[in-house]
Image: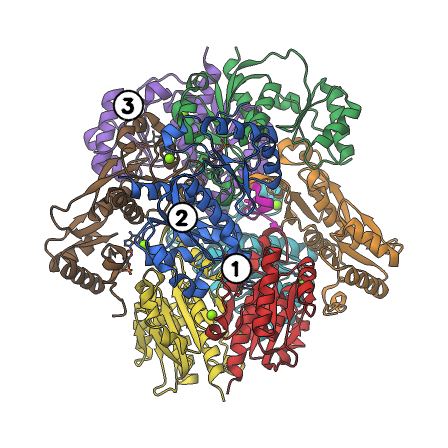
Chain colours: A green, B brown, C blue, D yellow, E red, F cyan, G orange, H purple
């Protein structure tokens, strides 16, 4: 096939290649999972469907699938997880994106605290969890609709915040563009933004930052 | 001239015509101010320049000009002001828009409390003024950049919030479009939005609501 | 589960939580309806499907479903309804959004008059109902396509108008963005805008305003 | 020079070339005016500045300039004007665009009625002039901000309406894009739209239609 | 029902109400068709589906359906058709929109010539039909993708051109927005634009113009 | 200074570095011109102002400035120019962009024919020059407003067309975005597009193509 | 039928008409394929579905279908292929667009090298194939998401680069608009852009350029 | 005045308030600088003009101004600077934004390496500095036009990259929106984005990350 498996990535970038399952042909997907599993003893894919899970399971019976996040993986047991990342969401509909972030960060060796459904329309929910959030090395804030959560967290913590706009909402939210603009224009310090629904990208970067904070 | 002075508006809409000074020719502007002052004993214009103030003053020496809001007016003394509207801003740069709102509402007979520079990047500033905001009949929230203030206030009060996006910011804020989208997509209840920098419109509607709350 | 039911909202915001049914998992939806019904003796959800109705009915046999608005509710009988809100639409296709607004306002204790299919392409239909509209405490104007109805009503009444752009239309209407822009740029006084198709938000805010006008 | 004067246009299109003065170099402008005047005994330019007027006047002392519309012309006296076009505006700020339309149509041989400042925020102004508008062969409706005037007129007359969005407004009006979208999405019958501020184009097309209605 | 059938439209606007079938409930649709047919002896609907045709046919067996244009109608036989409208398309994919225009104009009493698949990528096709186009009272030009056809025709004829952008195309055509912008910015004289895919609107206005040219 | 002069570019890319003068500080600009002139015996800059010309002339008295295109250069005399590129414009206002393209191509060794002011609103002007255009190796088509010229030329020639949208126009042309979209969506074969007003880029690529056609 | 088969195109444009299969009715499609095959002894269609393949095969049993690119063709055997075009992609998901380009160019007589999955997130993959790319007459660069591949290649080769944005990606990529903007704004020399997913257009233009480089 | 100096920020966020000088009134600006300097013994402002520098210097003679970045500051001597941030730019025009980032990070206690003018149109410039970039704790990548630099760096380093789109460019770059979209859609791992031209935000976040990597 044409695809070039980037097996040097682990050396170059400090992390093995993660599989973006969406839109891959069946044969192609199965062969990538097999090759990565053989090479690394573990394998991690995002945006997988139930059907893709069934398919890969025929070759790799230990594969695990989480329908909320769409993550399909075999992970080495007893991985050490260092530091702490707080992954927060505004509503329950943002949890699928947040889980993509959280599980990516965990796979890459970070410890994660989940703080979900703490959006700004009921601020007391966020304030009551502030101590956990403030003790993280890095915060991921996933929110759709107006996406104000990232700004509010950014003003309350002194650690980097990775903001993930989600496509949750309707009308003038334009599938997440509105939340993206909110976050990019944030007046709070220490916020940077990834693509709409890009939980993977947020989890990856948060883990890079978190591990930086834990190296000796 | 072609312009039709809408002298029946006070009967029909409960408020005299307000002059939008921006772009009016000198002669046109002066004659409108004179006619409205003769008719009502008071007159109120928005978006006036220093130069327009000098011009109108030659005919109406009692005219007053506020360079922050651009308001040019003669107001009857000892007007009664009923109820209470809280006019809030995220930053100091939003104050010119907020003052347009506040002074419009005052001109229309409402009592106004100003709560400025309480944006979400330093939430304690807002929380320390919450009692005043919560005791208003209606809140005006003016914010630029990411415009998150309206959502946060909307979640903390049970009165209608008029959100005014301002053009304060740069880059992807696109002269206020970003703040407008944030506010339109707000997940909080009881928020409605007026045009970017439209302090007049916010103050007008807030006053309609406030007076409704005070009628007997 | 992660979701935090906001049971203090009634105290804080003066209204119980309303359920946004769209996209909720079956289990999650049913459990929220049960909990809210137990707590308040009534429950109200928006954007429900026929299938969600069947599901909830298995646990709450008294639940009622309106396929036009997508509202799913048990409402206490003989609720007092105060004041008056006029809910207007431009065409018949806007009625589903208008009903979301009207029934929300009714659930929150407001009396509602429906004035449907009175768009500006046949102005006499609107003018013949003007007396009702003018006697309301607050008007909701729902319109798609070019959304001109809100401006025309705004010019004819002296009460606040909540404008709801709808996604009705095609082509350059861009799923409601055009109507939203029309309403945000309205030259009439006393208009503020909520998100595209956000009947709930309009009804909520209209009810806040209407009750303000009726308190003693 | 490179420019190719289109002297056959009068034969082909039934109207002599009109000069778009904006941005033309001084020499280029003066020479075009001279050539067209020599050829046709009249000449007509749009979007001219005061300075361009002074310049051309040195060569063509009979040239006339209207600072409101920016039209610079020598017109044959006692031109017959047939039929009737109603040129309407929403506000006084739209008059410069309307005059470009009106004077273009007059130059091309049409009779024009001006009905200015009849926007939808005060509908009685429009209704009181309805008889004139309804007796036209064609209507031009120029409006900025939300541009609702075209829809309202379209619903009240049975003749073609040429809608001209103007750049009048601020904020989310985006220099006329909002009014353009309103007009393109109009639910009224018999409306077509030209570019923002394109009074010339509206006047040209209205005159084509009007003369069609008057030919024998 | 809430819908207000606008039976006075024929008097006011010179044409009976046309039914926009898309999205109407079955009952509603059938009852409108019956009422209009009883009242006028003919009835005309746009954007109907095959299924809606079957439905209406049960009540009105003489109803006719054209799957290309989606038009559903009973038309009086031997209607006189006056003047001439040239309806042109750039490609074959634009024909469904063009037929909506052509058949609307025919229903309203205009004679129509169809000149299809004459887009600018093969200019000789257009030039070979120029005589017919130039002899029309009014031209409808329907084109998707880059929509250049309207400009080219506008430069070649001295009659009004109604430009209809279609949603034909892909990628940066953004469902017709690109063709709409092309047409709105046309440098040719005598072009005005209706909404994307709005064949009905183009046919209606073309017929207004054409009949104006034929009245005595 | 920080800037890294890319002196290997001639080897790598087959052309010396061209200076983008706009926004460069005075010192920086003069030193780049001196260094390039010393190295290559010629130097070529785009988007220069009159003031920059005066500045550079103090160091390089042979420098030449063309105020139409903004090109500032010293060119070796008697350069051979191979093949032929036709550079076309829709109007006279597009000539500054076209000259940037033409002079860039000439500097890079191509022969250029200029065919200006042949836009689609008067098609006979283009058709009368078709023989020259058809004999080119490559065509550059510069047009603003609706930008239809590129499509029309693309349909008439069998050589590659480089389309350059220009910012000429107003209103919904959005500073050239409309012309860009027209050209990107062209239904003609053999068209590719560069950035708005990017005459340099068009001339560079046209010259690459033309020289390819002339190599032996 | 209305469609005008452009049989003179081969003479005029040097290439027979290519069929855009998407959206064509079954009868229409089959008859076009038959007519072109009879006329030219070969026929080439893009964007065909499996179902269209089955249909055409009933009449033309030698027809071949490639499900990756959607190309449906009968090609003369032993066609000579001249010169060389390098067709590159950033990822494996861009291959369907790249194959449309490659096979179009091959059908038109060009030799093609495929260099797939060499995107900028792993630059060594691209650098290791640089010799092939640099020896091409013309490069096609297909990329979605951020589309940076075209710029990087443009900086490394001295031949024209045709950039094809693809709709691969999600969120703020807006179905390819983001990649299109990246490519249009490229700071590298010698890049021009075609529509999103327009592999056909890129292959056509690349072949025009390549054959120019090979003619004697 | 209304402004609330956020003197608790140093405690809460680990950094003193930085002054955004743009648009501040003279009095307001001078008083903020005096108060912060008194409180902290140092003070740091961004986006200051030459004129604001002169003004502040009258009160604080030790103030220093950098016209490239617009930074106005008094900084404590001999501040320790830990770790390392690589600040990269694509071109020389991006340096003003990069300096805002670099000097902000230095003020906040980070060591910075500047690697300027290494954009993708001449990749060897970047590759020759790769060792420095790869040894940083965090990279800031500032680029305008197509903004591809961030993706290329992201693929070559295993540390977090803060991407800053700049407004450098013209045409379809839309004042930086294009570069912003490129960066948000990056296919490389470990990239997050701040607002257009927001060097301050990038430097702040980079410093947070860098100091995290250096704490013991
Ligand atoms: N700042 C403002 N923003 C929007 N509308 C305004 C403002 N000030 C006044 N207006 C409205 O503009 C009308 C006057 O506009 P004009 O017809 O141009 O004189 C007033 O009667 C108000 O309804
Ligand atoms: N139709 C609606 N549109 C917008 N917001 C709604 C709607 N219906 C309910 N909501 C809001 O959504 C909240 C419930 O969201 P959740 O907690 O995710 O179930 C309610 O408290 C309302 O604030
Ligand atoms: N295809 C169409 N596009 C736009 N407007 C239409 C179309 N067909 C009918 N209409 C208009 O829509 C009105 C009917 O809308 P409705 O009351 O929803 O049936 C008609 O009177 C026409 O003015
Ligand atoms: N160049 C800049 N861009 C964005 N935000 C900035 C910039 N400079 C300072 N800030 C932020 O703006 C705040 C000060 O805003 P202000 O109160 O208006 O002076 C600072 O505390 C920073 O968080
Ligand atoms: Mg912070
Ligand atoms: Mg609230
Ligand atoms: Mg009103
Ligand atoms: Mg009408
Ligand atoms: Mg014409
Ligand atoms: Mg061609
Ligand atoms: Mg190159
Ligand atoms: Mg990386």
Report the Cα–Cα distance between label 2 and label 1: 42 Å
Is G185 covered by the magenta stretch? yes
Q: Which residues fall within the magenta stretch?
A: G173-195
**Secondary structure of residue under mark 2:** strand
Is H165 covered by the magenta stretch? no
Toward which corner of the image does residue G205 lie, by quadrant? Answer: bottom right
Q: Ligand 2 within 8 A of label 2's CB?
A: no
Disc on res. F112: none
Toward which corner of the image does residue H108 lie, by quadrant? Answer: top left
Q: Can residue A13 be seen in this view?
A: yes
D173 relative position to A41: left or right: left
Q: Mark 2 points at which residue?
A: C112
Within 10 Å of the Cα at label 1, are there few (<14), some (14-19), or many (20+) other Cα atoms?
many
Circle 3 chain: H
- Residue in view at x 52 percent, y 66 percent: E193
Q: Name the residue under label 1.
A: E181
């Amino acid at each position: 096939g044409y695809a070039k498996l980037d097996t040097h990535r682990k050396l170059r970038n400090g992390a093995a290649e993660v599989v973006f399952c969406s839109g891959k042909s069946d044969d192609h997907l199965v062969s990538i999972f097999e090759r990565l599993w053989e090479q690394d003893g573990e394998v991690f894919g995002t945006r997988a469907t139930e059907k893709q899970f069934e398919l890969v399971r025929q070759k790799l019976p230990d594969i695990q699938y989480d329908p909320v996040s769409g993550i399909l993986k075999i992970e080495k047991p007893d991985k050490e997880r260092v530091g702490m990342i707080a992954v927060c969401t505004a509503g329950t509909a943002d949890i699928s994106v947040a889980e993509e972030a959280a599980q990516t960060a965990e796979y890459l060796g970070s410890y994660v605290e989940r703080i979900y459904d703490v959006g700004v329309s009921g601020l007391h929910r966020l304030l009551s969890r502030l101590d956990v959030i403030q003790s993280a090395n890095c915060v991921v804030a996933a929110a759709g609709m107006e996406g104000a959560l990232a700004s509010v967290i950014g003003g309350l913590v002194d650690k980097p915040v990775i903001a993930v706009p989600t496509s949750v909402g309707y009308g003038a939210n334009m599938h997440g563009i509105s939340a993206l603009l909110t976050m990019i224009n944030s007046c709070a310090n220490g916020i940077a933004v990834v693509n709409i629904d890009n939980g993977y990208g947020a989890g990856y970067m948060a883990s890079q930052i978190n591990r930086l904070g834990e190296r000796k």
